[in-house]
Image (cartoon, grey):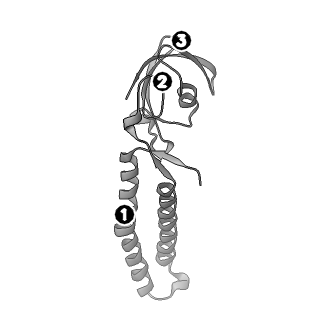
Amino acid sequence: MAITYMTKDGYKKKMEEIAYLESVERPKISRAIGEARDKGDLSENSEYDAAKEAQGMLEMKIAQLKDLVANARIIDDSTLNNEEVQILNTVKIKNVANGMTMEYTIVADSEANLKEKKIGSSTPIAQGLLGHKLGEIVEIKVPAGLMKFEIVEISF
C-alpha cells in the first residue's frame, strides 16, 4: 500500500469515519442479518442475502480506511512556507493564454475535493506547480494539451 499524506484534520476525519462505521453501521447490519435470519428459510430470503452483502461491503470499506490511516504520514504544517509551491499551499495561477486566474489548494489525494478547490497532489496541475516559485511560468500537460500558467500568489 502506498504512503498517503494527510493533514491532521484529514486524519482525524478518517479516524472518526472508522469509529462511526464500527460503532453504528456494523451493529445496524448485524441486527438486520439477525432479523432476516429469524424469518426462516435462508435459501430464499432476499433480505438476508442483501444484509450479508451490505455487511461484506461495510467490512471492505472499514479495512480500506484502516489501511489508509495505517500508511498515512501526517503533514506538519509548521514547516510550510510560501517561497515555493508545496502540499497544503493555496496557489493562485493565471492562464498565460487567456488571462483567466484560478486558485487551488494542493492537498493529499485522499482529501481532494474540486468543489472546495482542493486538488490532489498527484493531479497534473499540482504536479506541474509543486516546487515552483512565485512569478514563474510553468508548462503543464493537461488533457487539452500543453498550457502555460504564471504563479501569481502562494499562501497557506
Q: Nearer the viewer, residue 102 or 41?
A: 102
Q: Are marks 2 and 1 in contact (CB under 8 Å)?
A: no
- Does residue 76 lie above or below 98 as drawn? below
x 53%, y 22%: residue:
132
Q: Secondary structure at mark 2?
A: loop
Q: Nearer the viewer, residue 47 or 29?
A: 29
- Does residue 30 lie above or below 127 as drawn? below
| Residue with the mark numbered 3 | 96
Q: Secondary structure at mark 1?
A: helix
Mark 3 belongs to which amino acid? Val
The x and y percentages for residue 74 are: 43, 47
Q: Earlier in the sequence, mark 2 or mark 1?
A: 1
Query: What crowding class fits label 3: few (fewer than 14 Cα within 10 Å), some (14-19), or many (20 or more)?
Result: some
- Give the left or right position of residue 94, taking residue 128 as reference: left
| Residue with the mark numbered 2 | 84
Image quarter of the N terminus: bottom right
Mark 1 belongs to which amino acid? Ala
The x and y percentages for residue 113 are: 44, 39
Q: Earlier in the sequence, mark 3 or mark 1?
A: 1
x 54%, y 82%: residue:
44
Query: Picture quarter containing residue 6?
Result: top left
Foreground mark, 2 or 1, reads 2
Foreground mark, 3 or 2, reads 2
| Residue with the mark numbered 1 | 19
- Report the Cα–Cα distance between label 3 and label 1: 47 Å
Mark 2 belongs to which amino acid? Glu
The x and y percentages for residue 82 are: 41, 24
- Does residue 77 lie above or below 139 as drawn? below
Instruction: Name the disc covering residue 77, or none.
Output: none
- Report the Cα–Cα distance between label 2 and label 1: 37 Å
